Image (tube, rainbow, N blue to C red):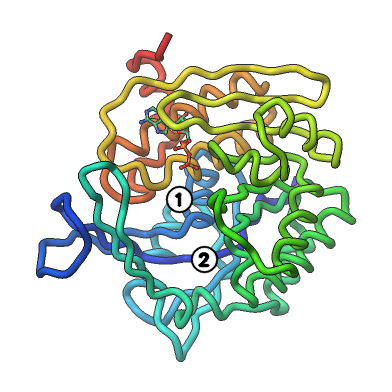
Amino acid sequence: LGPTVCVGEILVEIVATTVGDGFLEAQPLVGPFASGAPAIFISQCGRLGGKAAMVGAVGDDDFGRVNTDRLKRDGVDVSAISIDPDYPTGSAFVRYRKDGSRDFVYNIATSAAARFGWSQTVGDLIDRSGHLHVMGSALSVPSAREVIDKAVDIVKARGGTLSVDPNIRKELKLDGDTERRFSKLVAMADLLLPSGEELERAAGVEGEAEAIRRLFEIGVKEVVLKRGADGATYFGGQGDRIDAPAFVVQEVDPTGAGDCFGGAYLTCRRLGMSQQQALTYASAAGARNVTVLGPMEGAGTRRELDAFIASTERRP
Ligand code: ADP
């Protein structure tokens, strides 16, 4: 079984330590934290002992090294992360509002994160990978989209598998070409990992049951729906369903929960665990990550998740 490969943006995140509206006044910040949804996902895969590799780019700067050092420590193969000599590592500044919503300032479009492409090293990695994970949001980045298109075709043609996290807000209108790519990607997914309303967005129909039915009709094999503090549900193609209750935790920073959940679920399945067991580890990974400040600072190892599961209550 070749490694799980994730393609997409690598960023640092810098977080305001006070709650309020935006960044118009000087205020205390913490970071840089390693981030980018695909990087969080692959970090969690590596931490759990899965074979994992990342395709993306960072600048030749400390923000880039924060990420590559972190992923290396997690056991992720970083050989296909290119170092852009001309553009800085992408970054995102985030501040939480009282109601839990967030204000962002992004530096991504003109960063290394938006400029990586296909290379011999990427091709070699994709040629030996067993599973590809893609985030829908990466389809808006032209360079990432080219890599994803090629990688999906190669991995699927070799009998490898694909997981997709739609990672796209329900209201977001994509241009015609991106929408077609998104629909194609969803239909090719062996595992779809939507959260909340992304389920209906990915299926293109209203209502949970309708959306699930539609997704199996177009060829998706498994769906795991993430419901935040309300837990998660596995849906299989034969009408089977498993509800996974959430663990009861004090939420400090919700960023990264879904990516840790997805990385853990996929890795556990690839390591041979049942859906039920994988859901337990995934729910623990998501819940544990929200208890710590920083997008992937709470991603757990097998041992840390075992300890978390043993000591944390689940919602009834
Ligand atoms: P996303 O980050 O993609 O929106 P969710 O917020 O649904 O994903 O989180 C993914 C999973 O992480 C949930 O299904 C749940 O198992 C766990 N999780 C997230 N937030 C909490 C929370 N506040 N308490 C307990 N578990 C949580």
Q: Which residue is drawn at 56% across and 39% down?
A: 197
Q: Which of 268 and 292 is in front in this view?
A: 292
**Can you say which quadrant of the picture contains the N terminus?**
top right
Q: Mark 2 points at which residue?
A: 9
Residue 163 x, y percent position in the rendering: 69, 46
Q: Mark 1, residues whose alpha carbon is within 10 Å: few (<14), some, or many (≥20)?
A: many
**Amino acid at the residue labelled 1:** Asp
Q: Pick whichever of labels 2 and 1 is earlier in the sequence.
A: 2
Q: Which residue lies furthest to the top in this view?
A: 316
Q: Does the residue labelled 1 lie within 8 Å of ligand 1?
A: no
Residue 233 x, y percent position in the rendering: 60, 24
**Amino acid at the residue labelled 2:** Glu
Tag in front: 2 or 1 = 2
Image height of 255 relative to 251, above or below: below
**Can you say which quadrant of the picture contains the C terminus?**
top left
Q: Residue 74 carries which label?
A: 1
Image height of 263 relative to 4, above or below: above
Quadrant hosting residue 210: top right
Q: Which residue is drawn at 86% across and 35% down?
A: 217
